[in-house]
Image (cartoon, grey):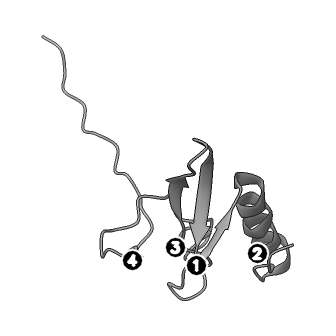
Amino acid sequence: MPVKRPEAATIRCLATNQSGAPCAAPPTRDSHYCSLHHDNNKEMMSATVTLTDDRECRIVVGLEIIEEWQFRKRALEFLFFGEVGESS
């Protein structure tokens, strides 16, 4: 007879997103929060995805529509330098 093994406990970030749902990301080392929420449960950046009339995927940050590479650049700037860059 097969033995049932308990499922491993999934550790998640303790923060919530803007809609109030729990964050699904794993926490960073020595923290209870993921890399996006690590600064006292503060999000570094919030974005949504949209399609242009030309069927191109774009990311909306605030009121600004940016390309995927710009979003990645801003996220890396925050992780390496501690601040989110302005549009270039």
The answer to whether residue 62 is left or right of residue 10 is right
Callout 3 amino acid? Tyr
Query: Gap in Å between the C-alphas at discs 2 and 3?
Result: 16 Å
Nearer to us in this view, 66 or 80: 66
Q: Residue at x 71, y 56 (%)?
A: 67
Q: Residue at x 33, y 68 (%)?
A: 22
Q: Earlier in the sequence, mark 2 or mark 3?
A: 3
Callout 4 amino acid? Gln
The label nearer to you, 1 versus 2, is 1
Q: Earlier in the sequence, mark 1 or mark 2?
A: 1
The label nearer to you, 1 versus 3, is 1
Label 4: which secondary element: loop
Query: Which numbered tag is attached to residue 33?
Result: 3
Contact, mark 4 vs mark 2 (Cβ under 8 Å): no
Whole-percent x, y for residue 49 in the image: 52, 56
Contact, mark 2 vs mark 3 (Cβ under 8 Å): no
Whole-percent x, y for residue 74 in the image: 76, 69
Q: Does 36 appear above or below 42?
A: above
Query: Gap in Å between the C-alphas at discs 1 and 3?
Result: 27 Å
Work out which quarter of the rendered image holds the N terminus and state it: top left
Callout 1 amino acid? Leu
The label nearer to you, 4 versus 2, is 4
Q: Which residue is mark 2?
A: 78
Q: Earlier in the sequence, mark 4 or mark 3?
A: 4
Whole-percent x, y for residue 31 in the image: 56, 74
Q: Which residue is mark 1?
A: 63
